[in-house]
Image (cartoon, grey):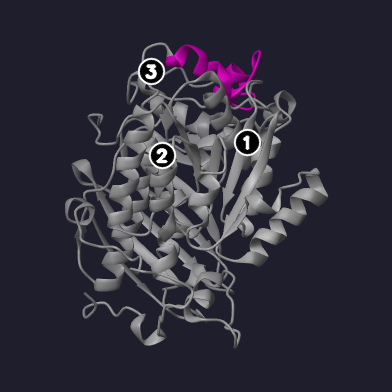
Amino acid sequence: METKNGLSRRSFLKSGAMAGALGAIGTGTGATTLLSSCSGQEEKKTAYTPLRPQSEIYIPYLTDKAIDGKPLKAGIIGCGGRGSGAAFNFLDAADNVTITALADVFQERVDGLRNTLKEKRNIDIPAENCFVGFDAYQKVIDAGVDVVLICTPPVFRPEQFKYAVEKNKHSFLEKPVAADAAGYRQVVASSKQAVAKGLCVITGTQRHHQRCYVASYQKVQEGLLGEITGGVVYWNQSMLWYRNREKNWTDVEWMIKDWVNWTWLSGDHIVEQHVHNIDVYNWFTGQKPTSAVAFGSRQRRITGNQYDNFSTDFVYPGGVHMHSMCRQIDGCVNNVSEFIQGTLGSWDSKTFEIKDLQGNVVWKYDFEQQDKEFKQNDPYVLEHVDWITHIRKNEPFSEAEDTAISTLCAVMGRVSAYTGSEVTWDAMSAADQNLLPADLSLATKMPESTYVIPVPGSTK
């Protein structure tokens, strides 16, 4: 179901849900304090007009730990850096949870996480629950786990999520949830099926579980900015990691070990990384863009076929423009933040302040009060707190569809920059675009000449 603003409603936004959810950002007076904090100054007494009804404003469970409940056994799909990090985030989020199965394309990745879990948490995963290969995800899902953490390169996530839902497993799905239009549609379909089956699905958009963002979101929905008139979102940083090819590596082995530099695997960094910032704008406004025009280039990237910078003009309903920029180049000014402008004022995630049109601060998030109220403030852990709490409360929900929408927005920017064309939401969401090669194995030939660097105006 879609709201009047065009974004799908989370399935758990139903009568009665807000009664428990609003207080779940904390305990005692913490919720009220953090959601209305002005760092000592009174909030301006203005008759604000809410952007949406209170019943449509979802506040996640952000207690220090998930509620007690049934034991949960997790399987990790993708044992690299993000999978390993997510594994420990999951363990830190609740009591009576453990990890019982591992999967990766590479044996050394499975062995690495298996050894680390034994060393740091005394979790001993039996050899028969450690799986290697492109079908290893199926074996983990079928190994008696209750939940799965899907942390493989983005192009693989839609099919793995589909199988998890078919097998009735609750899923943590790392962002972005896809790399192309076909993956977007698959995730949306699987997300709807998950909710229908009573499952809980969380995604790696951790800003949705970061207290300062959640509090800011509520204030924007209360109308402190007025009507949204535009914004700018940024992810500008130094060059990301890369892997030089070793002599004994096959084409596919090298590409997967160097996955953040190959478009077919990652979606390019506008999708893989900058989706976070685009998602914040979509979340706060409750809208998705109608079209995008972008440009980008490759200046200093060493491996792969991706760009290292993008600039995108997204047009939203009502002719509202949001400018998106991202860059991964050493020696340049960095900025990872979001700025949203409204008819009454603006919000900036650099400071987590709302200012009126004269520049006066009318609201500011109180980090000192947060530290007094809570022990756990890591959003990477808190997203698992929210997920596990929903599972143990038997409250089905899924973030996957909303994250799929933000993922496809980023794909629109990539395609526009690669081709030089205007890309519309309607065309992109229906596009015949699937970046996953058929019959993929480690022996599949993937010559670099096939993966050319796109040239705007000539690339289709």
Mark pair 1, 3: CA separation: 35 Å
Q: Is residue 168 above or below residue 15?
A: below
Q: Residues within 10 Å of mark 3 (few under 14, many from 20)?
A: few
Residue at (49, 25) in percent of width and height: 59
The residue that mark 1 highlights is 73
Task: Quarter of the image for the C terminus: give it.
Answer: bottom left
Q: Is residue 100 shown in magenta? A: no
Apparent side of residue 355 relative to residue 120 in the rendered image (left or right):
left
Mark pair 3, 2: CA separation: 31 Å
Q: Is residue 279 above or below residue 447?
A: above
- Sequence-wise, the earlier of marks 1 and 2 is 1
The image shows a total of numbered marks equal to 3
The residue that mark 3 highlights is 54
**Image disc number at residue 165:** 2
Residue at (66, 13) in percent of width and height: 28
Q: Which residue sits furthest front?
A: 128
